Image: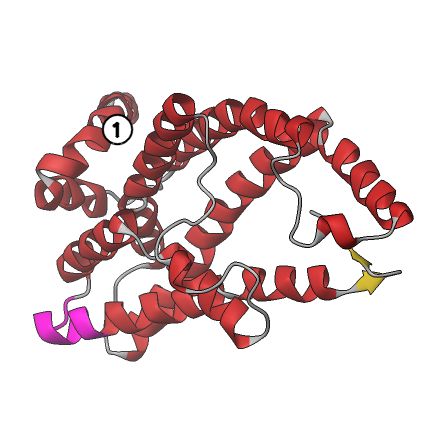
Amino acid sequence: MKREDKQKTEKKQHKGYPKWLFQMFYKPRATLTKVVAEDVSNKSTPLIFITIMVVLAVMIAAPVKTQLLQTGGTLPDNYQYWTESQQEQYQEAQQNKSSPIFMYGFPILTGIAGYLIFSMLMSSILYLALTLAGSRAPRLKIGNLVAWTMVPFGLRELVKFFVVGFSKQLVENPGLSNLVDAEAEGFNAYLRGILGSIDLYWLLFLTLLIIGANLISGLPKRKTILTTIVAVLIMLLLQGIPSFLSALMSGLSTGGVGFYF
C-alpha cells in the first residue's frame, strides 16, 4: 500500500508541474520552494517547455530567412567589388543554406543543445561554487533549480516567435550585442557573444537563481548571493566562446571568400 501511495503522490506532483511554469512569474519564491523540496528529478518539464519554444521560434524564422536569401537581403559589405567567381561561390553557399536542414534542422538542434548544455554546465558550476562555499545542497536539487530558473529563456523564445512573426524581420542583435560591431574580431567578438546573452530574461534568470539558491544552500544570505553571482558570471564568460570561434572561422578565407554559416 505504501508503494501505491507513493506512486499516486508522484503522479499528483507531475500533474502540477505545468502550473509551475506560469507560477514562476507571479509567485517565484513559493514555486521554487516546491521545486527544491522534491527529492526526485523534476527538470524535464521546464526543459521540454524551452524545447517547444525553440522549435516554434525556428519555424517562424525559417520563411523569413528564406525570403532574405532570395531577395539578396543578406549580401555582405563590398559584395559589388568581389570578382565574379567569388560572387558565384557566395551565391552557391547561400543556396545550400536555404535547404530545410539549414533552415530547420540545424537551428532546432543547436538551439535545443545550447540550452541543454547551458543547464548541465550551470548546474555543475553552481554546485561546485556552493560546495566550496560550504553548502551541502544535493546536486540533484541544484540541477532541478537551474532548470526551473531557466523558464524565462523559454519566454524569450516565445517573444522572439511573435516579434519575427509580426515584423517579418530576424532578431540579429540579441541582448546588448549591438554595443559591439557585428563584424568584430578577436576579443571584441568574444565580448559581443557575452553581451548578446545579457537581456531582461537573463536578469530574471539570475534573480530566480539567487532566490532558489538561498532556499537550498544553507549558507548566509549574503554569501549565497555572492557565490551564485560568481557562478553565473563564470557561465557568462563561457557563453562568449561560441561567438569568438564563429568569428575566427568566418575570418578564414579561401580565394578571398570566407566560409558562410
How far across and how far down the image is residue 17, in percent? 26, 28
- In this picture, is 30 found above or below 63? below
Instruction: Mark yes or no: residue 206 visible.
Output: yes
Q: Nearer the viewer, residue 119 or 157?
A: 157
**Left or right side of 50 for 261:** right
Q: Is residue 225 magenta?
A: yes
Residue under pointer 1: 17
Which residue appears at 14% of the width and 61% of the height? 214
- In this picture, is 207 found above or below 69? below
Q: Amino acid at mark 1?
A: Tyr
Magenta stretch bounds: 218-226
Q: Is residue 83 magenta?
A: no
Q: Nearer the viewer, residue 213 or 203?
A: 203
How far across and how far down the image is residue 254, in percent? 87, 60
Magenta span dominant secondary structure: helix
How far across and how far down the image is residue 206, in percent? 24, 57
Q: Residues within 10 Å of mark 1 (few under 14, many from 20)?
A: some
Which quadrant of the view contains residue 195?
bottom left
**Left or right side of 39 for 103:** right
Q: Quadrant of the N terminus?
A: top left
Which quadrant of the view contains residue 207?
bottom left
Q: Nearer the viewer, residue 146 or 187?
A: 187
- In this picture, is 130 found above or below 44? below
